[in-house]
Amino acid sequence: MVRGEGLGSLIRGLEILEIVQHNARMRPQEVADGLSLPLSTVYRYLKTLKATGYLIEVDGHVMPSQKLAEPDNSATHLVRYAAPALRKLSAATQMTSVLTVRVHVAALCLDSVAAHPKHRISFQPGEVRALYAGASALPLLAYAPEPVLREILDGDLKRFTSATPDREGIVRAVERTRREGYVVSEGYLTPGMAGFGVPVIVGGRCMCAISLIGEMQSLTRQEIIVATLKSFTTQLVEHMPIAVMEEAWSGTND
């Protein structure tokens, strides 16, 4: 009897994983409706699946985490190629550099280089954040397809800190990024921390974003930091190997 119940639980868990994988991202209620299960049962399974690393949750939606944390060859090539630039950026600015890509309506951190051993940021490789969560994510949102932007703006926006922008603030940040080519965040995600981010455009599309994260006093060097970030990004694209360009990340399953 116990064995049968265990098999039933396994099948149910696999069914939940399958429906989430098929739809890319779902709210718990949508999972419950899709499988004709009580919402309380779905929550119980989702809790286990998130705890074991099979699913992640962003803004009330669950998504398959293995797909995000273990990207395909295009991301692997990008990480290897961008790594030297990230190290040089951190050395030149004494700030932590971060490489991110868009996956659905989330920003995935592919790589980061800390400015120094004591400099810790909350966004680590393999982790995901909402597309409006600071300078590492907003450049990706600015160049995402219109349906993605609309879905973000129409959804439930989480306030990470009191400085996290509201819908109007996000729209202004997107417009500024498109107009001026960079984002500046002041405590949007972590109190006392500032961020500077730029999109990396290849072939007319945003392949990734590179950002610099530091203490709030770095805002006094904003013009220098933004100029340095743009310069490194331009050099990155100008010298990018054909193989990396051909496999440029494009934001999966839009």
Image (cartoon, grey):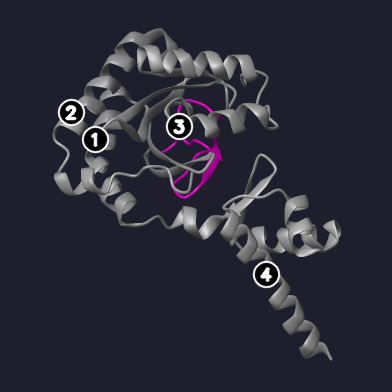
Kindly report the distance in space between the C-alpha atoms of the residues bearing marks 2 and 1.
9 Å
Q: Are marks 2 and 4 in contact (CB under 8 Å)?
A: no
User: Disc 2 or disc 3, which is closer to the eye?
Assistant: 3
Question: Residue under circle 3?
Answer: 144
Q: Which mark is residue 119?
A: none
Nearest the eye: 210 or 203: 203
Give the overall secondary structure of the magenta segment: loop
Instruction: Mark 2 or mark 4: name the one nearer the start of the chain.
Output: 4
Crowd rating for badge 3 (residues with CA inside 10 Å; few <14, some 14–19, many 20+): many
Question: Residue under circle 2?
Answer: 235
Q: At 30% across and 47% down in the image, what residue appears?
A: 79
Question: Residue under circle 1?
Answer: 85
Q: Do the residues labelled 1 and 3 touch (CB within 8 Å)?
A: no
Instruction: Mark 1 or mark 3: name the one nearer the start of the chain.
Output: 1
Q: Which amino acid does label 4 sit on?
A: Glu
Q: At 68% across and 65% down in the image, what residue appears?
A: 16
**Quarter of the image where the N terminus is located:** bottom right
Question: Residue under circle 4?
Answer: 15
Q: In this view, does 228 lie above or below 131?
A: above
- Say if the magenta span includes residue 134: yes
Q: Are marks 2 and 1 in contact (CB under 8 Å)?
A: yes
Instruction: Mark 1 or mark 4: name the one nearer the start of the chain.
Output: 4
Q: Are marks 1 and 4 in contact (CB under 8 Å)?
A: no
Kindly report the distance in space between the C-alpha atoms of the residues bearing marks 1 and 4.
42 Å
Residue 169 percent coordinates (x, y): 59, 15
Secondary structure at numbered mark 4? helix
User: Which quarter of the figure has residue 8?
Assistant: bottom right
